[in-house]
Image (cartoon, coloured by chain):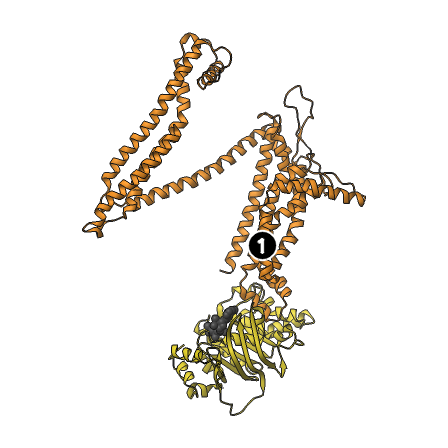
Chain colours: A orange, B yellow
Amino acid sequence: MVGYSLLLIVILSLVAYYVGRGSARRFAGGAGSDKVHSLPGYHGAFIAVWVGIPAFVLVVLWASFQGAMLDNLVISSLPQAFTDGKSPAELNLALSEIRNLASGRIFGEPAPEIRAAAERLLAWQHIASWAMVVVAAALMILVLVFARTRIAPRFRARNNVERVLSALMVFCSVVAILTTVGIIVSLLYESIAFFRLVPIHEFLFGLKWEPQIAIRADQVAGAGAFGAVPVFAGTLLISAIALIVAIPIGLFTAIYLVEYADDRVRNVVKPIMEILAGIPTVVFGFFAVLTVAPAIREAGGLMGIATSPNSALAAGFVMGIMIIPFISSLSDDALRSVPRAMRDGSLAMGATASETMTKVLLPAALPGIMGGILLAASRAIGETMIVVMAAGLIATLTINPMDSVTTVTVQIVSMLIGDTSFDSPKTLAAFALGLVLFIVTLGLNILALQIVKKYREQYE
Amino acid sequence: MADVALATRDVPTPEFQTVRTPDPHPRPTKVKADNVKVFYGQKQALNGVSIDIPVKSVTAFIGPSGCGKSTFLRCLNRMNDTIDGCRVEGEILLDNRDIYDASLDVVELRARVGMVFQKPNPFPKSIFDNVAYGPKIHGLARSKAELEEIVVSSLQKASLFNEVKDRLHEPGTGLSGGQQQRLCIARTIAVSPDVILMDEPCSALDPIATAKVEELIDELRENFTIVIVTHSMQQAARVSQRTAFFHLGTLVEEGPTDHVFTNPSERRTQDYITGRFG
Ligand SMILES: Nc1ncnc2c1ncn2[C@@H]1O[C@H](COP(=O)(O)OP(=O)(O)OP(=O)(O)O)[C@@H](O)[C@H]1O
Ligand SMILES: [Mg+2]
């Protein structure tokens, strides 16, 4: 029924558009048409938006509240004798049985009261859906007739449509902002619940992370320790390895492309970089687990270095490859936006291409390059898939890249899969980790954008 | 302008003679260009320019927009090498040495032939570092004190020192446009070149800053050979000893400045300086 209603809205809006345009055309062509305020199309759009949007809102609201209203009706229609002495939970159970029955799923032998209620529910649902269509149609026709009377040569249809459209856009951006705020609030809410169980200083400064505590009394597990330092240290170690791999490669790629490569090379290298940027991270994860990690283990074995099977080096190296395009394309932009006059000035002084690069172009582009590196770092810190597949699960506090470490994102994933309960510190700890991670990457992003913005102004 | 353009385009090879008026007291030649042709890809921008540029004097290039003044100027320090698809033919001698010869390094050439651009382009470094840039990359100073001496004397020669002596370590981009341009001149003379090329050095400056730069050019003439491109007839008349008039990729007339401005031998020169086209 919702589908039919939406179809009806579309059709009636179209009709409204043509009606509005048609009646506006009648005076637009005639004498004194220079006094007409808006083009006929705007009159059509004016009626169409006023017919379509309120009806659409009505249908959406109706569809979302219909279920709850009918549930209440059904419960109150149950005979006194049946509901007497039943707890709310039992009533809820009865309600879901009624709903199941109404949609044709029968379990066992339902009581006669339930059967009767299910039939009532079916009938009401039928009525309600039709009522929705009829009410929506009536509303649209009413609006259509009313709006049609507003159309006149001096009617400001264009401004009206413009206002409605801008309101629509404001609405959309408000939705996006509210969603973000909602996410942050829920993170905060759960984190505060966690900090009630585990003191915040213990979480931020504790050196031991053993979150796999028992959820049910019959499980065998550790006592639990929620010191996040080893987890963040693991994230830092892997991100640092990633940056050590990505910064030189990305930066030198950018320098080469800007200053030395001719057009032919550039036309090959740039698309390849874009392909690299488009590879799904799960594929990088495969690469890390199946190719890089065994190779590092073997190399370590040959040199007599003890290497863990899922070493930080493997995960960090592959993550580094993933963020190369970030660094190279942002550095490329930064180098390119150094004015040509700088370069010419240096070359005209008799500087070579590489002197010009290191003494003039790089220093001038440094803020932009720094911004790019910080953005890439926040990507690396928040990256999940590669480390879930390639990094370890045990939180060890180490700086040895051959060891296995775990990261914040890996811990969040491992805490929220499998047996969970929303009042155990194990589950809530995931939110606390997420909150800190969010604050860190947000800080990095703000810093990066600030730097990039400042340097943009430098030449303009 | 249209009929002139048509006339030259109809001639298959524009093999016409440049009208030359010698100096009453000729000076030795510093730069000698012989039949220089420049191509941007397929397009020819200069059709055989020959000129002798005398030492320790100011030579002005004038002519309508797009006639190839900057192109020719950039040939003299091989800045055209940095433009993709640009090709230079002919011969240019600096002190009787071919600057396009393989044995001559561009780095060496550009240290001897400096360039000042239309828009002031100080590096985003301190005033001191801007001037020290050239001496550093060419290894002209053996000690810090020597470097400082070069910087100070270059700033003095560019008549900028008194204005900036208290803020040598502040960014060069923080100066006014006219000061920036004089900083660029100081930067150029810091490597003690023989020749200084200036491409419309005052077109981004106000009249007072322009007057200062013109005064400076007049002083620099004692030690350097200067070639300046300008769109201002008055400026050419004020600062230069010789003037060369370019039109549509050819050098139409060259001679002593007062002769070119008061009594040009070519009809087109006359038309241009009296403002009839261009
Ligand atoms: N980089 C380039 N690529 C292609 N063509 C160019 C390039 N630079 C200049 N040209 C062309 O060469 C011709 C001469 O240009 P040039 O810049 O030397 O003129 P100009 O006399 O300096 O003009 P203006 O007074 O406007 O500076 C013009 O037709 C121009 O379009
Ligand atoms: Mg020019």
Q: Quadrant of the N terminus of chain B?
A: bottom left
User: Where residue B14 sits in the image (x, y, percent)?
Assistant: 48, 81
Q: Nearer the viewer, residue A221 or A425?
A: A221
The residue type indicated by label 1 comes to Lys
User: Where residue A68 appears, x then y in whole percent?
Assistant: 42, 22
User: Which chain letter matches label 1?
Assistant: A
Q: Residue at x 61, y 31 (%)?
A: A429
Is disc 1's CB within 8 Å of ligand 1? no
Q: Is residue B99 left or right of residue A64?
A: right
Q: Quadrant of the C terminus of chain B?
A: bottom left
Task: Examine the rendered structure and indicate whether residue A147 appears above or below residue B258.
Answer: above
State the residue in front, B219 or A61: A61
Residue placed furthest toward the top: A81
Placement of A228 over or under B35, stated as above or below: above
Q: Quadrant of residue A410?
A: top right
- Single out the residue that lies furthest toward the bottom: B24
Vertical arrangement, residue B94 with respect to residue A402, above or below: below
Residue furthest out toward the left: A31
In the image, residue A222 lies at what x, y percent?
69, 26
Q: Residue at x 28, y 48 (%)?
A: A39
Which residue shows up at 66% across the image and 45% down it?
A318
Q: Nearer the viewer, residue A175 or A207?
A: A175
Q: Residues within 10 Å of mark 1 (few under 14, many from 20)?
A: some
In this rendered view, identify the residue nearer to me: B43 or A256.
Answer: B43
Residue A441 visible within the image: yes
Name the residue carrying label 1: A270
Under circle 1, the secondary element is: helix
- Please say whether residue B155 is visible from this viewpoint: no
Question: In the displayed image of the protein, which residue is found farthest to the front?
Answer: B12
In this image, A116 relative to A442: left or right? left
Counting from the top left corner in percent of width and height, residue B72 is at 53, 76
